[in-house]
Image (tube, helix red, strand yellow):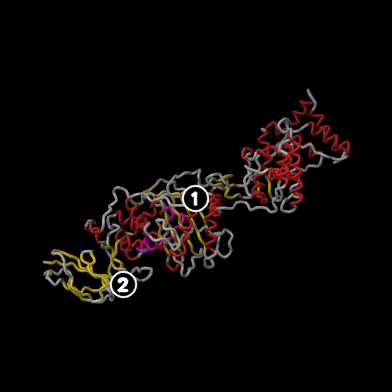
Amino acid sequence: MTRRAGLSLAALALALGLDAGGRDALDAWVDATELPSLAPATSVEMRDRTGALLRAYTVADGIWRLPVDPARVDPRYTAMLVAYEDKRFGKHHGVDPLAVLRAGWQALVQGQVVSGGSTLTMQVARLLEDSGTGAWSGKIRQARLALSLERRLAKDEILRLYMALAPFGGNLEGLRAATFAWFGKEPARLTPAEAALLVALPQSPEARRPDRDPDAARAARDRVLARMAEAGVLSEEAARAAMRDPVPTRRRAFPALAPHMTDRALAEAPDRAIHLLTLDRALQAKLETLARDRLREAARGVSIAIVAADHVTGEILASVGSGGYEVRGREGFVDMTRALRSPGSTLKPLVYALGFDAGLAHPQTLIADRPVAFGSYAPQNFDGAFRGELPVEEALRLSLNVPVVLLTDALGPEKLMAALGRAGVEAVLPGGKPGLALALGGVGVRLEELTGLYAGLAQGGIATPLRWRIDEGSEASARRITSRAAAWQVAHILSGLAPPPGAPMNRLAYKTGTSYGHRDAWALGFDGRHAIGVWMGRPDGTPVPGAFGADTAAPVLFEAFQRLKPSLDPLPPPPPETLLVGASRLPEPLKRFRGRAARLIPDPEAPVMAFPPDGAVLAAGEAGVPVRVREGKPPFTWMVSGRPVATGVRRRELLLDRLPAGFSEIAVIDAEGRAARVKVELE
């Protein structure tokens, strides 16, 4: 690094000035150069639907090295870099003879290398081979490689290599890694102070690291700014203003959004350098924050998962696999959007939609909610109570178990399994053959696929498996799971559910569910454009006492919609073929649902019509028709042909007057909702 280095540099400069035979020898020498790989390994990138970075993975040895496109770099940085490092970059062919002569002369005069004369291309050569900067042999090799690079690459390609390989302190290599680590952003827009710091750091990346020695970083940055003012790249005023800007004092974390889905993408296509996902970066960040916030209030070991999708396009916009990838005690590494769990009551809307399509029921059809048995299987409602006879739409809103099992029995559980398959739900049965418990959650499903089912209901009964890669499209064909009318009827019923306390009255169509033993709490909903699914529970399947979907998951669902957009998109109007009539105008077979194999279990405390007997023919006297009820809990409500005629009655005997001639149905309902009814004829 003394006169010998200077002589070598001077000799190189003289060689570059040769012509004729000397140039021919130089050309042959350059052409014979063995080039290192010009495609250095770069971090695998996961990008969202707009191209924004969701997550990146380090290359070998834990290095952050992201690919850079010079066209997407702030032009001010490029101008400052060239002006500071290699002002004749656009004119030379890899080695700047003037700079080499100057460096050689300074070395000869002063006995040491004062300036190396390295061009940006020579620096790229050094970075490609990871060679030193001081030894004269290294300089000669860099010059030879630089000359060869200039013959093979355009100037912007050389800049691309510099911007991808330049060191910026620690395990940071390349401009994009530096801007994310020091400024938390892409290099497309940089302040003069930021650009100057990025120009200064590669010269001495460890000594000038802002997080270790901010004073050294500031001094180096300010020298660049002063030089830029002298060169006319910046005005004096802009340079002075930039010197007042603070330097960063800590490294920022690289984006690590959607860790479960990005790991899944990498596992499925490990050879891809860039993965384009349908996720929305802003929404993903909002829902991950929501998940973390909710877990602060949850019991120990509870996790959470959220899937948000655009049901018009079938694209997943956000996928939260847990409340924190590395959260201790909650098994945050487990992707609960893909875990098999019992869906509780969340399959009931599909059962009712299939029942509507099969002509077994209508939202206004009366259906029994009272003790019933199918052989040895006797389903119970969650609260253990029974409501008697009530409209189907009310049975769905109340999420009663007995009515939906009655309907499943009439349909056949195999049809429910087939519908799940058409919706893209890979349901896993614990025993192999589907049974009636299927309707109440006796099956394993995944949140992502269940959200797809609700997206299909929102799309008029047409389901397309949700997708999360932009570049793959929707290869699976759309399948019809229910008719348009049935899907609309279910959506209309669900949109009438009251929201959780404190949530907006926005008529979101939603359904909650709680699996057996309080192991899973669910809430799934949709509006005219989006569908969101929420699951909460313990990944190991242990119970969470007192956890109900309506209390834990539903508030998260409504909050997720609020973070998605300021107001809901309206649900569509009913299709023309929808039967929109009241109970009294229904066709006779649809007025009351009658199961096929159920055996009603007598309730010893239920009301019994003591008089008149069923099928009696009575004379309509002026005093009215006497009626009498045994058992049951007062007060009673008496109805004639679906019309209440006496309410709040505590006596067990009553005279019903003004009954019309002909056939009538007389019903009595007690305080517990249990009912008894008879049909009579008045002459």
Task: Residue type at mark 1: give it.
Answer: Leu
* Residue 82 point in image, percent of width and height: 71, 37
Between residues 103 and 270, which one lies in front from this camera angle?
A: 103
Picture coordinates of residue 88, whole percent (x, y):
74, 32
User: Residue 91: x percent and y percent?
Assistant: 72, 30
In the image, taking residue 676 as reference, residue 195 lies left or right, namely right
Q: Which residues are magenta?
A: 429-453
**Residue 582 vertical placement versus 70 (above, below):** below
In the depicted structure, whether residue 411 falls above or below residue 67: below
Q: How many marks?
A: 2
Quarter residue 240 falls in? top right
The image position of residue 532, as x and y in percent, is 45, 55
The kind of residue tagged 2 is: Glu
Q: Is residue 423 left or right of residue 60?
A: left
The residue that disc 2 covers is 672
User: Furthest residue to the top?
Assistant: 20
Mark-to-mark CA distance, 2 and 1: 46 Å
Mark 2 and mark 1 lie on one chain; the one further toward the N terminus is 1
* Residue 1 counted in the magenta span: no
Q: Is 446 covered by the magenta stretch?
A: yes
Q: Residue at x 50, y 58 (%)?
A: 305
Q: Residues within 10 Å of mark 2 (few under 14, many from 20)?
A: some
Residue at 49% from the left image edge and 64% from the top image edge: 537
Q: Is residue 37 visible?
A: no
The label on residue 306 is none
The residue wearing badge 1 is 317
